[in-house]
Image (cartoon, grey):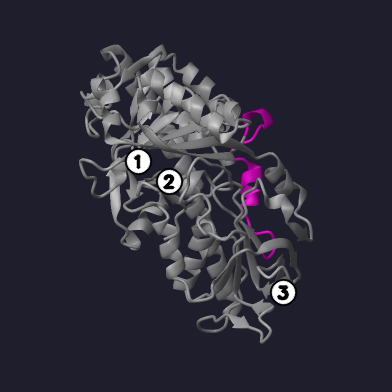
Amino acid sequence: MRFQNLTLCCTLVSMVCFSCTPKITQDKTKALTSSDSKKVTTPVVIVGGGLTGLMTAYELNKAGISSIILEEKEDIGGRIETINHQNQTTAESELEEFFATGPVTALLKELQLPLVEDTAHSSVIIDGKVYVYKGNGDRDEYLNGIFTADEKAAFLKWNQRTVALYNDLQATVAKGEPLSPELKELMTISFADYVKQGHLPRKVSEWIRITLEPDIATEWTEISALDGIDEMHIFLDTPAGFGEKNYHIAGGNSTLPDMLAQKLPPGSIRKNCHVAQVTQTKDRVTVNFMGEDQEPQSITAQYAVVTVPLSSINKIKFQPSLDAMRQKAIDTTRFGIYVKIHFCTDRDVEKTWAQYQNGRLFTLLTDSHAGSIYNASSFKEHLGPQDPLVITLLIQGKYAKDLMNMSSIQTADVLKKNVNGLFPHFSDHVTLTSAFTYPNAVAYWPLALKRSRFDDLAVQLRKPFGRVFIGGDTTDSSHADGAVKAALRMTHQLEELLKSTAK
């Protein structure tokens, strides 16, 4: 597993993934390397070693189709990165959890990774009051700890309608059918306006907003109601339970990309490869890149899968150029902002929040510059009574934007003051601080540009462009769920094409 030792630092993260191009034989495929190792012919060349690229290679390998991944950086994993601090604590630099019903959880269990289970919901601050999480997954105990009887009834009524719309949306997408007029209408209003139409009590609508916005890394006014419903479903009450459980990998989430890499044949991943051009002809695709030795190289394959985040994909030249519809889909996608802070502390820090021991305080959604506060040490399999802690802050959207132009020291000072406002003298217990900024963290489809992740532009981008496939957590949906959905979609399409080619 790869880790980094950090003191006070600020890391600007730009994720670039790439996908692979495959050629197939009648039986299992095999990568062929020329004698000078500068040109490689392979069934699938994967430009980028983020979760989508790794998952695509892993699934293709299970189907007997070999691939080569071209990763721009020294490390694989994209947004998944576990940090190992000098005081022997660990925490995630960005992606925190994996939700239960998403395809990524099936992958975690298939790989038999050790998981730490957590509930969907959190403690929350609404209008300055802290509502501590209660219930250990029980709906009524949690809601009764926040809402009055009338507020709870209003939420459950809104919840019922929203779940019905979500189920209708999922069934429509699964069948590949056009959206109903009701669902199409939800692409024309913001999620904020959709909630407003429910005439909910203020505390209920604020709970919905404060719960959703950390997940989308922007404001609920920026996305369509349809996209908001798709994101919010993991926090809603359904026949399967009250919200979706989520999982952290014991020992660090970086175990996932590392394990996927280990499942691939030796030589499948090439690092420090900067892709410049993807050229396709009638029967093949050539990917040109600058290799680790700073020499121009190329790989020719039958198909190419490009998993670069849409914030970076225009750095690659496509020949022929992408059609106008796909290019518009790329150019009109926007990105939410995250700033992540790790505060390594002594154990006496727990005294600063002792007044909130009538429930489980963390994770705490603050709706402020303090962001979402996690006790990352709670995700360890074994935590001794004297072991130091890591308290992490995930700041999103407008609050993160305020911090973007600050130095790491300024950012840490501002956030310490914010946390001190919640837990007096918290900063006295901080022994080490690390800061990370993500200006293009989470894709969203802006309502102001009449976008939705379910609109015609998004659907077109997810279709093969000749012999080139484009996909990732910025094309299908957000976070790890979107990354794995894209990988499974493209793998299925490739397998069908390659099977027909082999006949």
Disc nearer the start of the sequence (3/2): 2
Is 125 rendered above or below residue 484? above
Disc nearer the start of the sequence (2/1): 2
Q: Amino acid at mark 2?
A: Glu
Q: Amino acid at mark 3?
A: Asp
Q: CA distance from mark 2 to mark 1?
A: 8 Å
Task: Name the front one of labels 3 and 2.
Answer: 2
| Labels in figure, total | 3
Residue lying furthest right: 320
**Disc 3: CA contacts within 10 A as few (<14), some (14-19) or many (>=20):** few
> Is 435 inside the magenta-drawn segment?
no
Disc nearer the start of the sequence (1/3): 3
Residue linked to disc 1: 376
Q: Quadrant of residue 329?
A: top right
**Disc 1: CA contacts within 10 A as few (<14), some (14-19) or many (>=20):** many
Residue linked to disc 2: 92
